[in-house]
Amino acid sequence: MKIAVCIKAVPDTETKIQLAADRQNIDFTGVRFITSPYDEFAIEEALKLKEKHGGETTAFCLGGPEATDVLRDALARGLDSAVHVCDASFVQLDPLSTAKVLAAAIADGGFDIVLCGHQGSGTDNSLVPSMLAELLDWPQANIVVKLEVEGGSFKAEREIEGAHEIVQGSLPAVISAQKGLNEPRYPSIKGVMAARRKEIAQKDAAALGLAGKVGSAQATMKIKEMTMPADRPQGRIIDGDVDTAVKALVQLLRSEAQVV
Amino acid sequence: MTSTVSASEVLPYGEFLTDEHNAIAEMVRDFATREIAPKAAEVDRNARFPVETFKELGKLDLLGLIVPTEYGGAGSDYRSYAIAVEEIGRACGSTGLSYAAHCSLGTNPIKLFGSEAQKKKYLPKLASGEFIGAWALTEPGTGSDASSQKTTARREGDSWVLNGTKQFITNATHADVNIIMAMTDQSLGRKGISSFIVEKGTPGFYVSKVEKKMGMRGSPTASLTMEDCKIPAENIIGEVGEGYKQALTTLEGGRISIGALALGIAQAAFDAALQYAQQREAFGQPIGKFQLIQGYLADMSTQIQAARLLIYHAAWMKDHGKRVTLEGSQGKLYASEIASRVCNLCVQIHGGYGYIEDFPAERFLRDAKLCEIGEGTSEIQRLLIARQLGL
């Protein structure tokens, strides 16, 4: 079984986010990048599929130099090989362009399944997995919390509002992972050491046949402006004995918070 | 973690540490932060050895970090090991101590001095976490003065028969493999000491007293008693009479790890103190704006930096085949003493909150103190350093 995993380098979830001067992105100065947390479930599922069915696993990451560390991390966790998709024109891509690039990298690889996190931490668009499936013209299941693969088909349990939905489809397919799909393992020391010695393949726009076809000029959507969330107002302490304080609190919950 | 500093970020890059060390540091820190640190307070409060953490450390190859690959280890170097101890110790002093004792003392002597058969039998299991290791030199009447120990081993046919009590033995309650120093010839003093492997469950061998400690409470410390404890003749490590020499070599390497442990605890205390100083307000501003507090934090960070350089320099020397009798002692002495000072200031900066269990400051101080005592007291380190100076 040939398994592809799409991963994304995102700012460490503990980063103190500051906006860049042009307010069209965040300020990346000193930011540490990590694998997008949902992608960790995709990596783990790939490892489990390989343990069960055999085969090989490849990680794909589209991005700048920050991609190297997350690809090494994926290798350290046990994926067999890694492809860094990188080109000077692949900057500030919109989700559709990202999906086009990934589709070009994956299409002719003979993969049986593509696993992604269901959303990238930070931008949280949840668009790329579905767009990728459409561009590849493969079936897809997103927000998956349980996956079974047998023969040429898959059965996936999806999280939907208040319930779970079970869908079936044929392979090859694109599956996007939701928290709960599995418990991602930590890389081992041997894994970390082995990952340092593996080559990371590079693919640029020319190698993918995308020279001049994908870039900020072709983007169908652009970020116009980012703003920081408003400062959270200070907490308030309601004075007085219990009866008065509770009454005042209920009053405020009605009139101000409007939750009761 | 945002405010923390790691070895890889402060050392002359490419000099002491490689990319691989950097990657190992990230991996251990990630695991320690997510899986070990959240349990540190509970482990301390209940004096509970987190055996489940040890199984995980085994799975991740951390217990076998310096065990050669042919015996199931990762075959990494001493710098990686110091990094692992520092990062685990930063998350939880107790876990760091038990980890260091397992590797430096419970495993390393078999790797360094054991027979091929002993290596094949024990190292893979010590590396995987199936076995936990302990090492026993100290006795009720002897600590630093190893040559006057009372535990004996006498040869009887195809066996050795051990008698005596070892005290203050880290990991003793859970150890499957115990390395015991015993006198094979009392008249020879330190040259009459030999070392033996005693497995858990051997008749006549038992855990006799579990200590209640000031700090490092999640790392079990107990006495081991041997009463006509009979072990196979092949369980001697190396030759008869080599025990003391082996112990000195074992402790020489162990010192770097205790220094790294002290460093990890000091870094945790500094991180907590810095964060507290930035958040806690008094007289209308964060206390970190006051110069006395700034002075404390400046001293703490300077001392930690100096300790880190000493420790990783010693580890680098060891990885390059050099003796570290001097550098190991200097690193251990300095790191453990500044750790106590840094942790004391961490309590001071926290004020009343530093003195109560709700904050980790008081635990850091209790844990750090051990590093000035275990694996050679500060006084012994000074003697060893003086001897290296030709005094």
Image (cartoon, coloured by chain):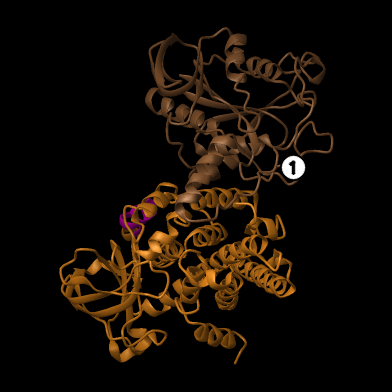
Chain colours: A brown, B orange
The residue positioned 47% from the left and 11% from the top of the image is A171
The quadrant of the image that shows the N terminus of chain A is top left
The answer to whether residue B361 is magenta is no
Determine the secondary structure under disc 1. Answer: loop
Residue B1 picture location, percent across and down: 60, 51
For image coordinates 54% across by 24% down, the residue present is A118
Occupied quadrant, residue A169:
top left
Q: Please tell me whether residue B357 is drawn above or below residue A245 in the rendered image.
A: below
Q: Residue B55 location in percent, x, y?
A: 36, 51
Where A240 sits versus A196, above or below? Answer: below
**Residue kind at label 1, given as amino acid type:** Gln
**Range of the magenta residues?**
B119-128
Horizontal side of B212 relative to B271 (left or right) equals left
Q: Label 1, on which residue?
A: A18
The one of B35 and B151 positioned closer to us in this rendering: B35
x then y, percent, for residue A135: 62, 10
Main SS of the magenta segment?
A: helix
Chain letter of disc 1? A
Q: Which residue is nearer to you in this view: B15 or A188? A: A188
**Can residue B240 be seen here?**
no
Q: Residue furthest top?
A: A137
For this orientation, the residue located farthest to the front is A244
